[in-house]
Image: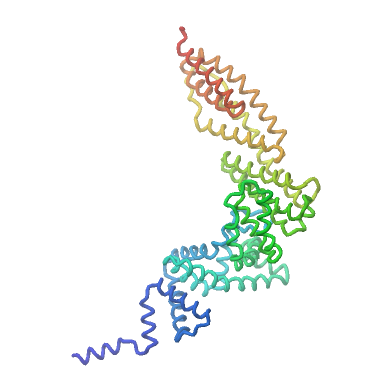
Amino acid sequence: MSELATAADQETAPASPGERLRAYLGALPMEAKALLATEFERARMRGEDLPGGEMVLALLRTDLREAADPDDPEEPAARSEQAARLLFRPLEPFLIEERLEAKTRGRIMRGSVQAIWTWVRRDLKPAETKVFEAAVLAASAAGDAEAVNYHCAKFVSVMIPAIEAKLGATEGGEPARKRLAAHLGDERVLEDAVDIIRVLPDIGALVHLPARLPAHIKNFADEGLDNARQLLDPIAARRPSLLPFALALVQTRLVHRYQIVRLAVAAAESDDPVKIASHPYRHAVELVLADAERALVAAAAALKVNRPQLVAAAVKDFHDAARALRTDMNLAGDGPWQRRLARMRGTLARQLSAEIDGVPGQIRRLLRAPQRDDVTHEPISPEAVADVENRLDLLTVCRNAASEIALNEITVRVFGEIQGYLDPRLTQLLEAIRSAPDVDRALKIAQIDAGIRFSARIFGASYAQLLQKAADVAIQSGRNPGR
């Protein structure tokens, strides 16, 4: 019996040291495999010759690759997305959601990053991507930030040459470029890919830049401007392809982000757009123009979903960007930047004109007298009043920003129209409430309250307080007609 057991043990035991090693490695947790593979790769990069190292690394890579391709179709997608976030995390300060009219250096569409990752994972380096995903996620799960950075840097060294080779193949002619753009889904993805291959391998040259600046720069002038130039001038001279990204990082420290244009004016020693456009610091102007366009896109999106508060915030952002350009630069002439800004101003003016032109009508519909006063009327809804208040806030923002968005005429007209209606209509309501029948009383009180709230936006808080006192007296006298 013991001989049979011994024979069975010999049959099941690994027959060679290689098989025993394979069995040992196979029994390790996936996180341990990833960390072990990291250490072997680091040793190889240091030039150390580890006995059996190549075989161990090959076995570990095989296990990691297989682990990255489980049967569940949703799990690989989630893991891949997490790995992509870790890989492209250094690009976060430069990512935008919007697709702008023109490509802006230093700004990368978030959608482009996803498209490029899918391209690399599916077509360019599928096997290497699987190994990277397993290794970087295991390192991340273990909390090993150094290993995460190592795996990301290693994969970048594989990914970037592959992208460069594909982009280089399109330089032979427009048809090849169009085919690749169609394959990726958008011409902008190709343009953003150029930015990615420029900045991602050299991101280490920029990561320490924000730490050398104050956390919040309230007024970007004088000493603050000089300090920024001391940090940026060497980059502009030695690594000009990184300057747009360095400018974007500086912009994150500005309380008034559009003041970044002052760097371009100071570097060119001129406010002439022609001279600035020929200087490396021209990218600062491009960043502000891109911010203005992003505000334009945000305003359009908010208008579609009827969010006046978000529209007002976007209009203010656009105004601040346009004003910074006009204040710090001489935009009197005709040029690409002037024309682009003029187009955006015109587009925003058209969008807002339709929005604010209807506000007087909304107010009239809420405050008008009912056709019959012998039936009970429902009070106006708080939602309707709040909507008009939001639109009046938007009107005020447009009025204050009218000079930068070409809305002087319409804002003056609409504002005057509302003023001319509110004051006499409230007087009528205050008189009517004194003798209003019970069926009509609740509606009139709600209209008075709404009119006072609207007046606070149009005439100011002090005037609204006076109206409120008069309304309290009128409503009280209506309740006590015998006194």
Q: Hey, which residue is sitting farthest left in the picture?
A: 1
Quadrant in which the N terminus is drawn: bottom left
User: Which residue is painted at 51% across and 17% down in the image?
Assistant: 373
Colour mapping used in the image: rainbow
Residue 255 versus residue 111: which sits nearer the camera?
255
Give percent across and percent down for residue 44. Answer: 51, 80
Residue 61 screen position, x and y as percent = 46, 77
Q: Residue furthest bottom?
A: 3
Total labels drawn: 0
**Outermost residue, front direction?**
223
As drawn, is 29 to the left or to the right of 95? left
Percent of width and height locating residue 402: 69, 37
Q: Is residue 369 shown above or below 415?
A: above
Q: Is residue 62 visible?
A: yes
- Residue 112: which quarter of the image? bottom right
* Viewer-nearest residue: 245 or 470: 245
Question: On the rendered structure, is 348 left or right of 466?
Answer: right
User: Who's the residue at 45% across and 76% down the image?
Assistant: 37
Front residue of 274 and 415: 274
In the rendered image, residue 291, in percent from the top left (x then y), is placed at 65, 50
Residue extending furthest top?
482
Report if residue 103 is visible in the image. no
Q: Which residue does the image show at 66% across and 35% down from the upper left?
A: 400
